[in-house]
Image: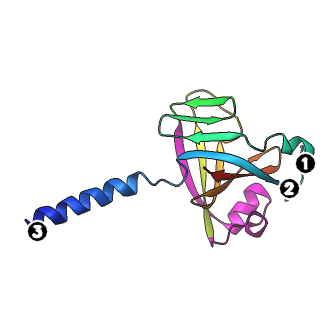
Amino acid sequence: MRYISVLLMLFLLSCASDSTIWYQGQWQVTEAKFPGVSAMGMEDAKAWFGTKATYTDTKVSFAEAVCDKPQFTLTTLTEGEFYALYRARFEQLEITTEATEVLTVGCPSDWLAPGAVLIKVTNNKAYTVWDGVFFKLDKL
């Protein structure tokens, strides 16, 4: 009986860990940061506040932009690697870890939209970047 109980607990734990992928769920834009050069000003950025994004295994959406059958790529970047790509320091985006995960969403068709890149701060806070603006997303 103990053996069955242990197997059941291990099974339940493995199922629970699969359902807690940090980026899955619904997110909302709450803030904008401008760590470098941007094609957008704060007034334009504020229009994005309240916009919702959803990430599931079968669909990603940001406002009206939708990606069906997404393909996810997770990359872990150190601060130096991150800066080389995004010209932003971890401190500017409230990232307190030595490295961060960056999710890139690919689609069967060319899908270039806000939300195609999600930069992890915590399991409940992330950024997406568009036109040089880092839009903060809070998980709902």
Q: Is residue 25 magenta?
A: no
Label 3 or label 2, whichever lies nearer to me, is: 3
Q: Is residue 95 magenta?
A: yes
SS at circle 1: helix
Give the residue pinned by disc 2.
Answer: 34
- Residue 73 versus residue 71 in the image, above or below: below
Q: Which amino acid does label 3 sit on?
A: Arg
Discs 3, 2 touching: Cβ within 8 Å: no
Near-viewer residue (95 or 48):
48
Start-end of magenta stretch = 70-98
Q: Left or right? Give the position of 94 relative to 76.
A: right
Q: Residue at x 52, y 47 (%)?
A: 24
Q: Position of residue 7 (x, y in %)?
A: 18, 61
User: How many numbered tags mark residues here?
Assistant: 3
Q: What residue type is labelled 2?
A: Phe
- Residue 5, image quadrant: bottom left
Tell me the crowding category of disc 2: few under 14, some 14 to 19, or many 20 or more residues within 10 angstroms, Cα based.
Answer: some
Give the residue pinned by disc 1.
Answer: 42
Q: Left or right? Give the position of 95 relative to 108.
A: right
Discs 2, 1 touching: Cβ within 8 Å: yes
Q: Which of marks 1 and 3 is nearer the N terminus?
A: 3
Q: Position of residue 99 (x, y in %)?
A: 62, 68
Q: Earlier in the sequence, mark 2 or mark 1?
A: 2
Q: Where is residue 95 in the image (x, y as percent from the top left)?
A: 68, 67
Cα–Cα span, label 3 and label 2? 57 Å
Q: What residue type is labelled 1?
A: Met
**Circle number at residue 2:** 3
Residue, far left? 1
